[in-house]
Amino acid sequence: MNFSFKNSIIWTMVLVLSGCMGKAQNALTHVKLDNAIEARPEKNIPVPSQFENLPLVEPTIAAHPENNRLLVAAAMVVTDVDRPYQSCRLSSFFSNDGGKTWEETAHDYWGYDPWVAMLDNGTTTMSWLGTPTVFKHQFPLQIFSSDDGGRSWLSEMQVFNGFGHGHDGTKLVGFNDAFYLTTVRFNADMGADVVLYESKKQGPFEEVISIRGNGKRLNFCEPAILTDGSVVIPTMHGSEKIWANVYNPNTDRISDTYIISDNPKLGRGYSRMAADTNLNSKFQNRIYFVRAVADGSSSEGVWLNFSMDKGKTWTKEKRVDLFKNGLPSKANVASVAVNKDGVVGISWVDGQHSTDQKAYDVYFAISKDGGVSFQRPVRVSKVSSNPRTQANADVANKFIGGGHYLGITTRADGSFQLIWSDSRSGIFKLQTCRIKIG
C-alpha cells in the first residue's frame, strides 16, 4: 500500500513482531572467500589540527565525484576528556591534493555527530547537532553549506530545532543534484522518530517524511540514493526488526515496509548503508547494509545484507571478516562504500594484529562480485592503537573505536579513502589513507 505523504507520518505499528524477534540466532556463516588480494593501502597520513593536545574522534569524509584531488572531512574535538559527551566542538578539514595536506576550520559549535557530503559541482553540506558558542544540552540540527568543496563555509545556515530533547545522529548523502539527510528526532516522551530531509538544486532542506516510533527509540543509518532518484530509508529498533521504506521524490510516495533483517543485533557503532550508482556496473542499484555486531561483551564480527531489487528483498546476513588467524572477533565501527566500478569496500577496526587484542587496527575488505564473496581483510593502519591512555581518559570508554562511526568514501579514480581516529601517539588523532584496487 502506498501513501501520499509530504509531511505525513508512517506508522511503524504495522510491523508484526515474530516470536523469534530479538533472540540470538545460530552463528552466522561467512561469505565466500575470494583468494585474490587486490586492496592496496598507501601510507597513513596524519590530519593535523590546531587542537594539538585534545582528542579528535568520530570523523566523516566525502570526496568530489569527478575531481580526484578534492576531499572534505569533519570530526569532533573533545575539550574535556573527563566529560566527553558534554564538551565536543566541531572542526572541518579540506584537502585539494588528495589527502596529502589539510586545512582546518574550527567552528564554534558544540554538540555531536558531524557528517559531510559533496556533489559534482563542489556544493558541500555538513550536518551537526548542537548549539553555537557553548554546549547547552540542546541538539538542534544545524546544516552548513559550502560552494567550494568545504574550504570555506557560508555564514547563512539552516536550523531545525525539533521537539523535546532535539535530535540524535545525522547521516547525509548526495547524488546528482540532491542531498538527503536522516536523523532521529526525539518527542517529548523521549520516543524517537526517523526523519528524512531533502535539498534539491542547492535549495533549502525540507522535511519530507517521518517514520513514527510511537514511544519507542528508533535508530537509523544513512539513506541510499538510487540512480532513478528514489531514496532507501533504513530504520531499526533494538528488540524488533531492521526495515526499509523507499521514497519516490517524483511522486511523493513511500513504499511498503521491506524487512532487511529480523535479527536486529547492533552494538558496535552505527550500522551503515551504501548503494551502487555506477551506470556501467552490472550490480547497479544493489544496496549494501553493514553492521559490526556484539552479543553482550562478545563481538560477532561484521555482518552484511544486500538487496538486488532496489530494497524490496534482502539476503540473509553473512559475516565478511574472513580472518584466518583463529583469534576471536573484536570488530567495531564498520563502514561501507561502493566505487565507480561496483567494487564494495568495507572497513572496520579490530584486534587481530595484537596478541592480547587490547590494541586495534583498521582493516579493509573488498568484494568484486556484488557482495557474494570477499577478499581477506588487509591491515590499513601501520601502527596498532590502544585507546586506554591517560591522555584519552574517559574518551576511551565513550569512543573505544575512535567514535561511533568512522569515515569512508570513494574517489573519482575508483580508489577508497578512509579516515579514522586512533591513539598510536597516546591520544586520539585523525589518520587518513588511500586504498587502490588492483
Image (cartoon, grey):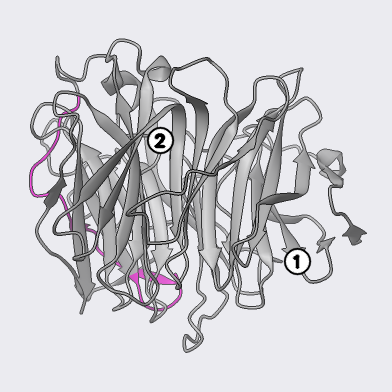
**Position in image of residue 62 (x %, y %):** 38, 58
Closest to the observer, 1 or 123: 123
Check residue 375 for magenta coloring. yes
What label sits on residue 249 in the rendered view?
A: 1
Whether residue 24 is visible, yes or no, is no
137 horizontally vs 341: left or right: right
**SS label for mark 2:** loop
Q: Give the image quarter of residue 113.
A: top left
**Kind of residue at badge 1:** Pro
Residues in magenta, as a range: 367-387
Tell me the CA gap for discs 2 and 1: 30 Å
Residue 9 falls in which quadrant of the image? top right
Counting from the top left corner in percent of width and height, residue 321 is at: 32, 54
**What secondary structure is the magenta-colored segment mainly?**
loop
Q: On the rendered image, what quadrant is the C terminus found in?
A: bottom left
Q: Residue at x 38, y 82 (%)?
A: 341
Q: Who comes first in sequence, dot 2 or dot 1? A: 1
Mark 2 sits on what residue? Answer: 404
